[in-house]
Amino acid sequence: MLSLSQAFIYSAVMALAIFFCRSFPFLFFRDKPETAPAERRRKEAFSSFVEKVVPRAAMTVLAAASLMNPVKESLSETFPPDILPTAIPLIIAGAFTAIIHILKRNSLVSIFGGTALYMALIRLL
């Protein structure tokens, strides 16, 4: 159990970290009046690159991380009987999520659809 002073220190550190994360983009992308047009275009190009690449990269890393451990665990155990109940629903739901996202281009629909299919498959198999 934390003492009152430890809880206060941890809360203050977390508040500073959250404040820094929230204010960092405003400090980093703030235009100064003397900013040259070339520098402004470079910042705009960087921010548009980040807007396009980072969400896709984050979703790819999250998908790979969520699929890696259960498949690795099922493969490390005895191969034929244990792989079917654990890895097959993951692969089917992941493929379904990708297909729905390609067809609908809506992240919310694809994530909820894949999650619902995965939950149904682990209950059925």
Image (tube, rainbow, N blue to C red):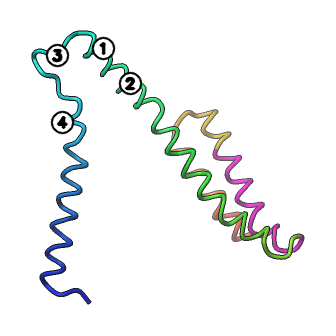
In the image, residue 66 lies at what x, y percent? 60, 59
The residue that appears at 74% across and 53% down in the rendered structure is: 92
> Looking at this rendering, what residue extends furthest in the top direction?
37
Mark toward the start of the polypeptide (4 vs 3): 4
Mark toward the start of the polypeptide (3 vs 1): 3
* Residue under numbered circle 4: 27
For marks 1 and 2, give the one nearer the viewer: 1
Amino acid type for the residue under numbered disc 4: Leu
Q: Main secondary structure of the magenta part?
A: helix
Q: Are marks 1 and 2 in contact (CB under 8 Å)?
A: no
Q: Secondary structure at mark 3?
A: loop
Q: Are marks 3 and 2 in contact (CB under 8 Å)?
A: no
Task: Say if 16 sits above or below 50 in the image.
Answer: below
Which range is magenta? 80-97
Amino acid type for the residue under numbered disc 1: Arg
Task: Say if 102 sits above or below 39 in the image.
Answer: below
Mark toward the start of the polypeptide (1 vs 2): 1
* Residue under numbered circle 1: 41
The residue that appears at 18% across and 80% down in the rendered structure is: 6
The residue that appears at 20% across and 11% down in the rendered structure is: 36
Is residue 100 or residue 54 the one in the foreground?
A: 54
* Residue under numbered circle 3: 35
Q: Quadrant of the N terminus?
A: bottom left
Amino acid type for the residue under numbered disc 3: Thr
Verify whether residue 91 appears in magenta. Answer: yes
> Looking at this rendering, what residue extends furthest in the bottom direction?
1
Q: Secondary structure at mark 1?
A: helix
